[in-house]
Structures are given as structure tokens and as C-alpha cells.
Image (tube, helix red, strand yellow):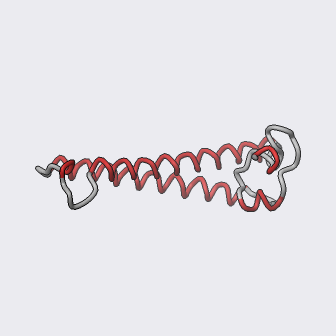
Amino acid sequence: MTDPTGQLRRTRDEALALAERLLRDMEAVAEAREGANVDDEHDPEGSTIAYERSQLDAVRRSALERAADAEAALGRVADGTFGRCERCAARIGEARLEARPTARLCIDCAR
């Protein structure tokens, strides 16, 4: 992987934008619940509002983790350790970095 900086920045920025959209969606769900007089916990027709918020929060946390991984990889690019395994210091394979640019470990150490 020649210069991963652009791809890592895009990954970080897209993940942060997704997390922000999901936060707004969670807030909208909470506002909708405040304005409604419903007993969603006992509604046999579908998922509860709490379940929907939980799902949104799980995806949001995943997006924030992806953004943090990309930011950490950018730090490794800046300090010259990108592409080196954090455990054994071996080169991380080109194919692994192409598939997962935020990889911290070589394939052997990741097993």
C-alpha cells in the first residue's frame, strides 16, 4: 500500500459522519417517544423503541470504533510505524493492508 493516508482519512470521516447521523436518529426516536402516549414494551406488532435505540447505538459505537482505528492508523503513518506489526514488528502483508488498512497486527499475530 503506497500511501494509505487518503483512504484512512475517508474511512475516518465517513465513519464520523455516520455516527453523527445515527446520533440524530437516536435523538429523533427519543423525541418521538416523548410526544407519544404508547406502551411500546407490550406492543406485539413490532420492535420496541428501546430496541430500535439499542440497535442505532450499537451501529454508532461500531462507526466510532472504525473512526478511532483509522485515526490510530494515521498516527502510525505519521510516526513511520504503519505497516509494521505491533506485536512482532514484522511487515504486515500488502494484501492484508489492502483489505484492512487499519490492521495493527500481521496475519500470524492476528490468529
The residue that appears at 83% across and 45% down in the rendered structure is 84
The residue that appears at 71% across and 57% down in the rendered structure is 100
Pinpoint residue 28: horizontal percent, then vertical percent. 28, 53
Q: Residue furthest top?
A: 87
Q: Residue furthest left?
A: 37
Q: Residue furthest right?
A: 90
Q: How many marks?
A: 0
| 66 relative to 1 in the view: left or right | left
Above or below: residue 12 compared with residue 98? above
Q: Residue furthest front?
A: 44
Choose between 26 and 14: the one closer to the eye: 26
Pinpoint residue 81: horizontal percent, then vertical percent. 82, 43
| 12 relative to 60 in the view: left or right | right
The residue that appears at 56% across and 55% down in the rendered structure is 13
| 28 relative to 74 in the view: left or right | left
| 28 relative to 73 in the view: left or right | left
Quadrant, the N terminus? bottom right
Pinpoint residue 43: horizontal percent, then vertical percent. 18, 55
Pinpoint residue 26: horizontal percent, then vertical percent. 33, 50
The residue that appears at 56% across and 46% down in the rendered structure is 65
